[in-house]
Amino acid sequence: MEPLPLSFAVLLNYLYQVVQQIDDPRQASNATRYKLSDVIVGAFSVFFMQCESFLEHQRQMRSRRGKDNAQSLFGVEDIPSSPQIRNLLDGVEAVRLFDVFFQVYAA
């Protein structure tokens, strides 16, 4: 069996496919500021970049330059804070993201 290609773009594609299938556990509200996909991908970006202050650095970069790596590399439109990520991810079952691991493992 020939191995599947695995690149950063393929990995993100796996993540996006899975994230799009996850229902947002929040009730619809005008106060909902961040898309669940931005929260999940934002959390992934912190682990991928191995920098706990990555998202804060991106916010600062966006305010100074009008653009940041979270947006250009990961497609995150709005950057939530770390506490917001933790609060929102508490409502998402981890098992919903297991398919990403299985797809990467298969590749």
Image (cartoon, grey):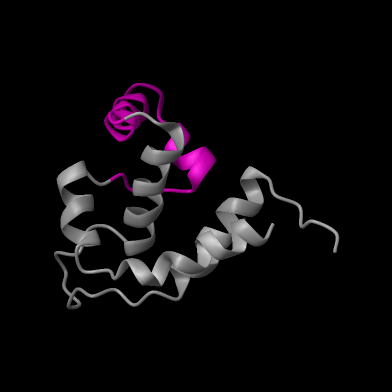
Q: Position of residue 78 (x, y in %)?
A: 33, 48
* Marker count (numbered): 0
User: In the rendered image, which quarter contains the N terminus?
Assistant: bottom right
Determine if the magenta segment contains residue 76.
yes
Q: Residue furthest right?
A: 2
Q: Position of 84 compared to 61: left or right? A: left
Q: Nearer the viewer, residue 22 or 69?
A: 22
Q: Based on the displayed image, in which of its 4 quarters is residue 14 positioned?
A: bottom right
Q: Position of residue 20 (x, y in %)?
A: 46, 71
Q: Based on the displayed image, in which of its 4 quarters is residue 51 positioned?
A: top left
Image point (40%, 23%), residue name: 65
Image point (30%, 32%), residue name: 59
Kindly tell me whether residue 77 is visible in this rendering: no
Kindly tell me whether residue 101 is visible in this rendering: yes
Q: Position of residue 102 (x, y in %)?
A: 56, 64
User: In the rendered image, which quarter contains the C terminus?
Assistant: bottom right
Which residues fall within the magenta stretch? 52-79
State whether residue 76 is above or below residue 32. above
Image point (37%, 38%), residue name: 46
Q: Based on the displayed image, in which of its 4 quarters is residue 21 positioned?
A: bottom left
Determine if the magenta segment contains residue 89.
no
